[in-house]
Image: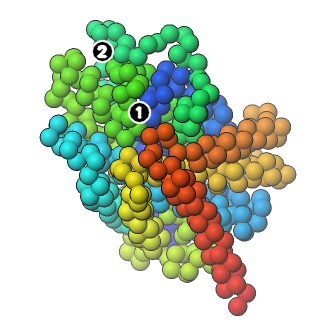
Amino acid sequence: MKLRRVLTFRDLFLFYIVTTFSLRWIATAAAAGPSAIAIWIVAALGLFVPLVFTVLELSSRHPEEGGFYVWTKRAFGPFAGFITGWTYWGSNLPYFPGLLYFAAGNALFIGGPSWQSLSSNSTYFILVSMTGLVVAVGLNVVGLNVGKWLSNVGAMATWIPAAILIVLGVVSWSRFGSATPMSAGAFVPTTGLKDVIFWSTIAFAFGGVESASTMNEEIQDARRTVPRAVLAAGVVMTLLYICATLAILLAMPKAQISGLQGIMQAIQVMTARVGVAWLAPVVAVFVVLNAIGGVGGWFAATARLPFVAGIDNFLPPAFGRLHPKWGTPHVALLVQAGIAGLFVFLGQAGTNVRGAYDALVSMGIIAYFIPFLFMFAAMIALQREPAGPDVVRVPGGKPVAIALAALGFVVTAVSIVLACIPPDDEPNKMLAVVKVVGASAVLVGIGAIIYAIGKRRQKI
């Protein structure tokens, strides 16, 4: 049974928005102050631009289902391809709970101050996260033609909170002035440890444009649709990140902003200031929808990696099966959901809700960026192949392609190192490092073992 081509340009554009642009990174950036504006620009040039051109060229060279799993496999062999797909898939296991924690934290603003007593309640966060997980996987098992609507709704839910945030920021500034000092020096990034640590998160915020390449066989006219959707979404996303971050800083001092609930805290303050406090709960609904849509979109993309690996016989054959009615990789989706559910509980070990959220984010960053190292290296290695007429080349050809890929590789490597450092307010720093680094090492080790077992199975 073949996968169905159901994704149009509109679907893909919205998919990129919901998987790449996330409202939660706006608050994380704003907490660093006005210098975050410069970091957004540096991250866009240092990671997003190399990533976009790498995806455009490699997806046009090899548009098969599996994306960078296929690219890395072709450049460096089956083991590198498997580890790339495995760690990318594994990075979403802590990423899903982190995004769902964000949804749960901001959902408390729907009920107003009376609900805020749950902001440190671990049971509440676990229950909401598990519910969101069930909804996301259920819709994707039924099929992309159904599951894509969760992503589409999530993308559309991005516009309203972002637009309201920007408008309220301007109104608040015009009436009351800026809550954060905006001198020229404030926009210059500092190199203190606390400020440098969040750089990896900002780089992480620009990841996502590579995700749809794993579903190329389900995209209508992938060679033409992917480049158009990537470029359109990239421009929109960068502008939204910068404008929304600035809006929060206009409304709140950076010391009062948190990464978990920061965006709704800012909206709550601004709506109260301008006399439209009733609007805050409405915006909270859209923030939650955006987060749930992001989980659904990433579920759709990453489940295709174990599906392809199952076809290649590195994973049990069940991973390569399609549902007889809906034509989806249901086994891969359900296994992924089960392990992600386990991470919902593991993130709480030895820490509070805020610490669990920070640990889940760091775990996700490290595992997510390991495949980027392989992908940028594959971009360099595959320049040895002749480019056909349908290949979307980097302007400037091979030398520029190699330079951009090398830049992306270095930025990715630095981001991985920074993600290992726990935040200042983490109560148990050593445990945080052990959880983050240990979980990433275990993920790679399990992948190597599964690959070895798969190779042995192939020889029998």
Q: Quadrant of residue 62?
A: bottom right
Q: How is the image coloured?
A: rainbow
In the image shown, does 137 or 370 lie closer to the viewer? 370
At label 2, the amino acid type is: Ser
Q: Residue at x 52, y 45 (%)?
A: 422
At label 1, the amino acid type is: Ala
Image quarter (top left, top right, bottom left or bottom right) of the C terminus: bottom right
Q: Is residue 411 above or below residue 271?
A: below
In the image shown, does 80 or 184 lie closer to the viewer? 184
Report whether 365 appears left or right of 288. right
Q: Where residue 27 is drawn, which disc sits there?
A: 1
Q: Quadrant of residue 289?
A: top left
Furthest residue to the bottom? 460
- Could you tell me residue 213's position as x and y percent? 58, 53
- Could you tell me residue 457's position as x and y percent? 67, 86
Q: Quadrant of residue 115?
A: top left
In the image shown, does 73 or 347 lie closer to the viewer? 347
The answer to whether residue 387 shows anywhere in this view is no
Report whether 123 appears left or right of 201. left
**Dot 2 alpha-carbon crowd within 10 angstroms: few under 14, some 14 to 19, many 20 or more:** many
Please name the residue that numbered disc 2 is placed on. 172
Q: Is residue 264 above or below residue 288?
A: above
Q: Residue at x 62, y 57 (%)?
A: 67
Q: Give the CA separation, mark 1 to mark 2.
A: 17 Å
**Dot 1 alpha-carbon crowd within 10 angstroms: few under 14, some 14 to 19, many 20 or more:** many
